[in-house]
């Protein structure tokens, strides 16, 4: 909100595409460096000129892919996150400015060493050439060491939330399992890419030797990587990430998570569940094809088999990154900044900055509390103000459109990826306004209502959709609801005054119709229940469905609502079938 907003067709997919391609190359840049130096040492010790010639040719492919495509996609990540999440990018830069400086130093060393290594094949002594190779690998892996801390920080900031310290943020709860997982991935990708360049070899004996050597890099990854991922998930759960809830497991232990993934759990977040299963299937396919290539057909495998192998590995790695990103929702920086750039208040008990620093910084206008008081439209610098001559309905819709752009567009599009229009089809302004208030509520570790500054904060989100809480004022919420209702086909007139409807119908339209109205996912009408039965159910809504809030109105309204529900005609589901 402190930066211009760029309207992108699918912001989440844009980041995902660029990041996954970059990760698939950058991890090869780490593991491939180790592969080159160890393969060269092996060839020189054995006096195998043919194998050494292969390593030299492989280094050309390595340099072109990592220094060209790796660098382009690396810059692309900065470009895309700057467009989609400028506030989070600013926080990462300010928090880890020396970490970035160290990483860029390693990166420059990495590029220089790679160029010297490639052009030094016929110019340097074998001893010096190997030394340059080791310098390259050390710089590449140390670059990963730093970047891994920043990436894992985005999911589990740990003690940084209270201290704000560099090291407490970098060495966060998921740092070590993530580092092991990424290192094993880098080693395995080195073997996969080696098979790609070996597929064109015409010397059968050399091809077998390279394939067997590459297989020695792939198989350990297949064994160690799952253990590292399991460690990562347990560490994330211990840091407060609801891993079990997201993956539809009965708990956060490895056994419960495995049962949820292998048993086809109907609960959990569908995207995260499906991505986790793609990780398992892709990894199994990668291992199976690798074993076939390395041990069954090491002399005759070709590029089609290797491309299939790389496609499976790409799918598994991309899905793994997707799971990591999905575990973080609705945050972009775990328990600190929501995906729309809104910050949560500092945890209760966290040390405050010195008075002179606090005075220089000033109050934070972009925390949830501040925005709910001042409003997102007033706090934001880049807002399109509707014409003062427009009629009230047009002005309200224009304000709602701006609120949507500021608070919702980092995830939702109008008609594209995660489109909002189908989700609000046929819903009234009143129902949407009530729904917006329930998007996310703060609870403590025991599930009790808590403050947003609770150090053990958890989010209870509407129907488990894991969306951020609405950050604006009541007036902005009404404007957003009116705009969304218009997108869903509601008339372009201001909503009628509540007195035009009976209290029971008004309550239903506001509190219930988003889920239980005609055409919604769970229509209530026509189920053969009497008013007495419905009255009794209204008294125990959380027991009927844990996602429903308790009825908190007076007994008179409860009876009137039961009578109203009993009078509704047979409803139809969103797919058209009678219920």
Image (tube, helix red, strand yellow):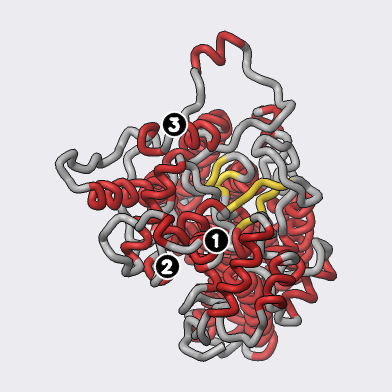
The answer for how far apart the CA atoms under marks 3 and 1 are is 26 Å
Task: Name the mark nearer the viewer: 1 or 2.
Answer: 1
The answer to whether mark 3 and mark 2 are in CB contact below 8 A is no
Task: Tell which of 362 and 194 is nearer to you.
Answer: 362
Mark 1 = which residue? 511
Q: Is residue 367 above or below residue 518?
A: above
N-terminal of the two: label 3 or label 1?
3
Mark 2 lies on a secondary structure that is loop
Task: Name the mark nearer the viewer: 3 or 2.
Answer: 2
Task: Tell which of 368 and 117 is nearer to you.
Answer: 368
Quarter that holds the C terminus: bottom right
Q: Which quadrant of the figure has residue 439?
A: bottom right
Q: Is residue 501 visible?
A: yes
Task: Name the mark nearer the viewer: 3 or 1.
Answer: 1
Q: Residues within 10 Å of mark 3 (few under 14, many from 20)?
A: some
Measuring 56% from the left and 13% from the top, which residue is drawn there? Answer: 357
The answer for how far apart the CA atoms under marks 1 and 2 are is 12 Å
User: Residue 66: horizontal and vertical position, in percent?
Assistant: 46, 56
Mark 3 = which residue? 374
Residue 427 - label: 2
Quarter that holds the N terminus: top left
Task: Tell which of 460 and 337 is nearer to you.
Answer: 460
Q: Is residue 209 above or below residue 64?
A: below
């Amino acid at each position: 909100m402190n930066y211009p907003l760029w309207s992108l067709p699918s912001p989440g997919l844009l980041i995902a595409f660029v990041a996954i391609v970059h990760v698939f190359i950058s991890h090869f840049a780490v593991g491939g460096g180790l592969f080159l130096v160890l393969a060269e040492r092996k060839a020189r010790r054995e006096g195998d000129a043919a194998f050494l010639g292969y390593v030299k040719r492989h280094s050309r492919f390595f340099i072109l892919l990592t220094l060209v495509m790796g660098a382009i996609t690396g810059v692309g990540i900065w470009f895309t996150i700057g467009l989609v999440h400028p506030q989070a990018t600013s926080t990462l830069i300010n928090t880890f400015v020396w970490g970035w400086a160290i990483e860029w130093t390693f990166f420059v060393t990495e590029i220089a060493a790679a160029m010297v290594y490639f052009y030094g094949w016929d110019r340097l002594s074998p001893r010096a050439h190997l030394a340059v190779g080791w310098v390259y690998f050390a710089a590449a892996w140390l670059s990963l060491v730093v970047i891994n801390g920043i990436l894992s920080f985005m999911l589990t900031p740990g003690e940084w939330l209270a201290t704000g310290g560099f090291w407490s943020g970098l060495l966060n709860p998921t740092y070590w399992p993530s580092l092991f997982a990424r290192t094993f991935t880098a080693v395995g990708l080195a073997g996969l890419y080696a098979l790609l360049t070996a597929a064109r070899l015409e010397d059968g004996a050399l091809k077998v030797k390279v394939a067997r050597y590459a297989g020695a890099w792939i198989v350990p990854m297949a064994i160690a990587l799952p253990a590292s991922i399991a460690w990562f998930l347990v560490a994330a759960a211990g840091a407060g990430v609801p891993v079990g809830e997201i993956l539809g497991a009965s708990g956060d232990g490895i056994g419960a998570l495995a049962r949820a993934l292998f048993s086809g759990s109907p609960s959990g977040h569908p995207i995260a569940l499906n991505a986790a299963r793609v990780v398992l299937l892709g990894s199994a396919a990668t291992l199976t094809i690798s074993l076939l290539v390395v041990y069954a057909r090491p002399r005759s495998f070709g590029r089609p088999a290797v491309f299939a192998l790389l496609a499976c590995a790409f799918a598994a790695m991309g899905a793994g990154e997707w799971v990591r990103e999905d575990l973080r929702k609705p945050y972009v920086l775990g328990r600190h900044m929501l995906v729309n750039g809104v910050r949560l208040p500092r945890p209760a008990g966290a040390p405050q900055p010195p008075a002179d620093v606090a005075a220089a910084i000033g109050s934070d206008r972009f925390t949830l509390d501040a925005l709910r008081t001042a409003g997102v439209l007033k706090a934001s610098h880049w807002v399109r103000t509707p014409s003062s001559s427009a009629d009230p309905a047009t002005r309200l819709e224009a304000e709602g459109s701006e609120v949507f752009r500021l608070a919702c567009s980092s995830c939702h599009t109008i008609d594209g990826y995660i489109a909002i229009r189908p989700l609000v089809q046929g819903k009234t302004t009143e129902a949407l306004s009530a729904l917006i208030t329930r998007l996310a509520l703060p609870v403590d570790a025991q599930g009790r209502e808590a403050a947003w500054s609770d150090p053990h904060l958890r989010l209870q989100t509407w129907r488990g959709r894991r969306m951020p809480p609405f950050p604006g004022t009541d007036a902005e919420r009404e404007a957003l609801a009116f705009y969304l209702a218009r997108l869903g086909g509601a008339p372009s007139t201001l909503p009628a005054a509540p007195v035009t409807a009976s209290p029971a119908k008004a309550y239903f339209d506001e509190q219930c119709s988003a889920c239980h109205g005609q055409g919604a996912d769970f229509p209530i009408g026509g189920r053969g229940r009497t008013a007495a039965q419905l009255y009794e159910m209204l008294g125990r809504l959380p027991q009927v469905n844990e996602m429903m809030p308790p009825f908190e109105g007076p007994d008179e309204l409860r009876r009137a609502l039961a009578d109203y529900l009993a009078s509704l005609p047979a409803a139809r589901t969103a797919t058209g079938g009678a219920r």
